Image: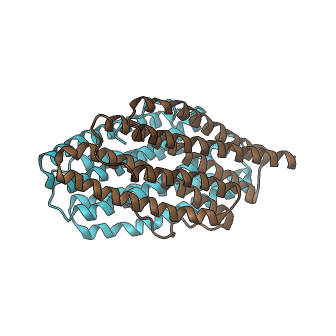
Chain colours: A cyan, B brown
Amino acid sequence: MERHFDEELEQLKAKLLKMASLVESIIAKSMESLEERNPELTEKIWDEEDSINMLEIDIDELCHKLLALRQPMAIDLRFITSAMKINNDLERMGDLAVNIVGRTKIILQYPQLKPLNNIPQMAILAQEMVKESLNALVNRDSKIAREICKKDNKVDDINDELFRELLTYMMQNPKNIEAALDLILVARNIERIADHATNIAEDVIYLVEGKTIKHHIEERKGIE
Amino acid sequence: MERHFDEELEQLKAKLLKMASLVESIIAKSMESLEERNPELTEKIWDEEDSINMLEIDIDELCHKLLALRQPMAIDLRFITSAMKINNDLERMGDLAVNIVGRTKIILQYPQLKPLNNIPQMAILAQEMVKESLNALVNRDSKIAREICKKDNKVDDINDELFRELLTYMMQNPKNIEAALDLILVARNIERIADHATNIAEDVIYLVEGKTIKHHIEERKGIE
């Protein structure tokens, strides 16, 4: 049974990595339609969203099966309960990418307001954070996990800067208000994706080091 | 041992109800400073936030203890894993209330833009949803849980209406932009609190009826 259980844990890890790669991909696709200003690209995300939702249920079932049949103790128990939380975070990131696409459909009705630079930059950081947080989990590496928390501050900084910049556009010309507001909301969804990756990183630190950092990590920054 | 386990489950329910009442209270306090335009009131939430954060850790530990020592099966196992998720949702609601207070501090620097009516109205609905979602859990009542999902649509409708109204204020006078934007962000935090309560309600429906509705419930509405 021991060996079989190890195999099941490996299977769980593989499913979580698959889930993370789907999430990275849906984030990338949500940016693609915005950057290329192509409304048709917004349709490309539905298959991805379906896969994420089905995989979430699949992972949750596997975790329950392992808890019920294997009655794991100590570190294995913690790994499985962390997997359940992380699965939840990943699924919500998928929802946030869907929000971005919904918002993009509105944005594409207006002329382009400004070079987008910092929004895709935030999205790339968020994608990296998703990938790295899962690597930190499967390698039980709390050092990588701590780096992710720092990266989150960078995302928050870009978001704050963009917020102020877009506010200026709005004040300069009220015609810019709607488009600028929509960009603010897109950026906010990316920032929330990064927050979920940070939650995962915090769970990994807890799993590896046995201490909760989430309520006393360097204070979370960013406009909320 | 059976009886002891039942007592522990009752203890877990009591702790979750306590957590929910702290969350209701922090939401109420976040509104108080906004409605009374009193920056001193913003300080009143820190004790509440500390209590929520400590109780979250406490509930998480209790769930792990029950999983490890009692090795629960079937419905008891599902109840404990749901409790872990719900605990997480409640803690994040606390964070969102803290965001509202942060935003309120900025809002109070500007003259009042408009009667606030619909923001406190949203907050009251969100508080009700928190209370009812926990009642649904402890009474294993999926009917109440379904009502909560409907109430979430009402919160989204008020939020959409407010969004459009504040957009008009911004267009009429660029001097309103900052204050209006801050109110939009406060409303969005309340809307996210309501979303977390809806997540809890969906977990309860799954627990009671054994089916996942979250990916095919009446489509989530609202500006995101």
- Give the x, y percent position of residue A4: 69, 55
Residue B99 in view of the camera = yes
**Within the image, what quadrant is residue B222 found in?**
bottom left
- Give the x, y percent position of residue A22: 43, 59
Q: How many numbered marks does the figure carry?
A: 0
**Within the image, what quadrant is residue A203 found in?**
top right
Is residue A9 shown above or below A50?
Answer: above
Q: Residue at x 65, y 45 (%)?
A: B16
Residue A29 in view of the camera = no
**Left or right: residue B44 compared with residue B157:** right
**Within the image, what quadrant is residue B102 found in?**
top left
Q: Residue at x 66, y 55 (%)?
A: B135
**Left or right: residue B77 compared with residue B84:** right
**Left or right: residue A118 compared with residue A130:** left
- Give the x, y percent position of residue A185: 31, 52
Tell which of A7 and B124 is nearer to you.
Answer: B124
Q: Residue at x 58, y 59 (%)?
A: B201
Is residue B149 shown above or below A158?
Answer: below
**Which quadrant holds the C terminus of chain A?**
top left
Tell which of B156 and A189 is nearer to you.
Answer: B156
- Give the x, y percent position of residue A18: 48, 57
Tell which of B176 and A196 is nearer to you.
Answer: B176
Is residue B141 shown above or below B91?
Answer: below
**Which quadrant holds the N terminus of chain A?**
bottom right
